[in-house]
Every structure is written in C-alpha cells, then in structure tokens.
Image (tube, helix red, strand yellow):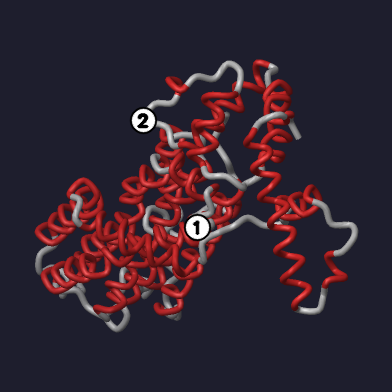
Amino acid sequence: MTDTTRYLSRVRVLTTAVRLVQYAATSLPGVTPKEKDSGHSDIEWLIDVFTEADRRGDAVAFADVYETSSLKKACDASTRAAVAAEKTRRRRRGSEESLADGVTTQSLADTKLNTTSSTVTPGWWAFYVMLKYRTRKNYRDPEYLGPRLGDKIFLSFIITTLYLGRGNDFGADNVINISSALFMWSTLPAFGAAAYIPQIVLERSLYMRERADGLYNPLTYVVAKICDEMLLLVFVTLCIAVVVFFAVDLAGSFWLFWLTYYITLGNGIVLAYLVAAAAPNMEAANAILPTYVVTLLFFAGFLITPEDTPSYWKWYSYVDLMKYAWGALMINQWDGNDPVLFAGGETLLETYELDDVNKWGYVGYLLLFFCAFFVLAFLALKHINHSKR
C-alpha cells in the first residue's frame, strides 16, 4: 500500500466529493484550484492530485496536513456518531456484546473499508439500463447501423443477382455454381465481423471506468453488447435470407438456411469481441481477426476435399466453424437431389463426406462454437487489462 493509499484510507468516505475537492484545492500543499478543468470529474481530479503527490514524494506531507485539518475532525465526529448509532441499533436488537469493548472509531472504519467484494449495480438492472439507453441510441445512429447492415445488404444483392434462379438445377454442371454460392453465404458473416472490433476497442477506457465505478460486471457488459447486436440482426438477416433463398430458388429448409447464416454471424460477433478484448490495440485486432478467418476457409471442405487434406491438418477441420456452416447448407441443398459426379458412382455429398450427416446437428455445433467464443470473450474482458497509468 502506498503512502497516498494510506492517506486516502484515513480520509474515509464520510464527506461529499465537492467538499473533498474544496479541501484538496485550498489546504493541500502544491495544489491550486485552477488545475481542475471541465474535462475532469471530481473523482478523476482527486486521483490525479494524489497520484502526482506520490510521484513528488508529497504524500506524507498531505497526511500531516490532514491530521490537523477541520476535515479530519468532521470525519472523526461522523465516525463516532456512526459507532454510537450502531451500538444503539444492536442494543435494541439484544446483541450489544458483538460490538462492545474492542470497537473503536478506527476499527469500525477499517472494517467498512476492508471489504472482500466491490459494490456493483445488480446485473439485471445494469442490463436493462444499457438496453434502454445505449441500444435505443445505437439503433437511431446511422454511423452505428451503416457498417453493420451495408455490407450484408450489398453482398446479398450480389449473390442474388449472380445466381438468380440457379438453385433448382441439380445437374452435375451446376454443382460448382451452387456450392460456391453456399460457401460464400456461410463465410461472409465471419468476414463481416471486422465491423464489430471498434465497438470494444474504442469503448475500452469507458468500460474500465464504468466497471471500476461498479456500474456493471464484465458478464453484464458482454451480454448487453451481444443482445445489442443480435436483436438488430434478427429482422435484417431474416429479410435478406428470404430474398436470397427464394430468388436463387434454393432447395431444402429455409429456416436452416437462415439460422445457419444468423448463428455464423453471431459467431463472428463474439469472435470479434474476443479478439478486441485480447488484442492490445486496434491495429493488432484488425490483423489477428482476418488472419484467423482466412485459415478457416482452407479447412471448411470446399477448397480442398476432406479426403485430400493432409493427415497432419485434419484436426483443424474439426475446430473449424466454417466446416459446419457450409456442411449444413450443402446437405440442406443436395440431400435428396445428390448428383453423381464420377463414373464410380460417388455422389457430391459423398465426395465432401457429408452423406449420412445430420444437418441440424451441424447447426448445433455452430451453437457450441458461439458458446465457447462467448465464454472466452467474457474471460478476456474480465481478466485482461490493457490500461496503463
């Protein structure tokens, strides 16, 4: 514990911030009122004052001044009054012995200060406040909506117009066309995740301050951010999926087609949060995320078949969320219309080792990836601190 921290502990939390600022500005050596500008809150200014005092070696002088100050007398009087009130309350409850002879002004104050947990706003209330104010504000902000909706609408327009009406052609000549369309549909959400990195990196200082102030805990923060993004995208992705699915005239379940896109997009968002929380700055995050996403493309099963993948790389395909997204879409499209590609009678799904695979099971795997990335993002936000004082 530094001298400044000891000094702060002796001040107690028995006076208003305004009074403490006035005392610091008028009574402490080396501090003048003009040092506090409109950009500082009272608490931030006080922390700066005490931190600079520590660096100058003035913390002991601060403590000596406080010992003889009227503020200390007022704080001590407030503490004695609190002790007396507590004794009276316990006496009335018949438990005076628990606060008897050993209790002093100092010991009671130390007990109050030496707590084992911080004061935090209840998670449900913090979640409600963030949705009520920040989510509503974000949904009215074009700068927030643009990066989240523009790329999805534009790229869906390209897929729709490029593959218009080709989905009902199950011939061998059309296999590469529709398989490519499904591959792009499953990979684009992950690439779009880069738009969500600034949300965490740019809010890092605000997050650290509000978390330190007890406004919310890391779990509440990350849940609120995910809900902020996913609620917006439910309607948007549903509309986009309707247009693409029916305009291209794809086969299979529309709901699987949409859910695969939506859950893959959710994976991209929590993955972006994880990278943003773990990376030291925006440059590092913007380098790490696309590099990782590109590695997923190689092992999704489309660029190289599972059979031809080297044995020492096969493990990576099992932890590749793109494999399950594209695989679910391929089974949805070709199951029941599986064309024979080779003279030996091998079909398309057999070539990609997707025969006898449950497409909804692959959607379930995508949900597991979402949960895993969510937990990792939460742990990164909770335990990794990039701030330096």
**Left or right position of 162 against 42:** left
Decide: few, some or many residues near mark 1? Use Cα within 10 Å; few <14, some 14-19, many ≥20.
many
> Which badge, 1 or 2, comes first in the chain's sequence?
2
Q: Quadrant location of the N terminus?
A: top right
Whether residue 63 appears in this view of the structure is: yes
Classify residue 83 by image quadrant. Answer: bottom right
Which residue is label 1 attached to?
A: 216
| Vertical position of residue 117 compared to residue 124: above or below | above
Amino acid type, label 1: Tyr
Q: Secondary structure at mark 2?
A: loop
Classify residue 127 by image quadrant. Answer: bottom left
Which residue is label 2 attached to?
A: 38
Q: Position of residue 304 (x, y in %)?
A: 42, 54
Give the residue drawn at x 49%, y 55%. 215
Q: Position of residue 115 (x, y in %)?
A: 72, 55
Q: Secondary structure at mark 1?
A: loop
Q: Give the camera-side residue of 170 and 56.
A: 56
> Label 1 vs label 2: CA separation?
26 Å
Determine the residue located farthest toward the right in the rendered image: 101
| Vertical position of residue 298 compared to residue 43: above or below | below
Give the residue drawn at x 31%, y 47%. 195
Q: How many marks?
A: 2
Amino acid type, label 2: Ser
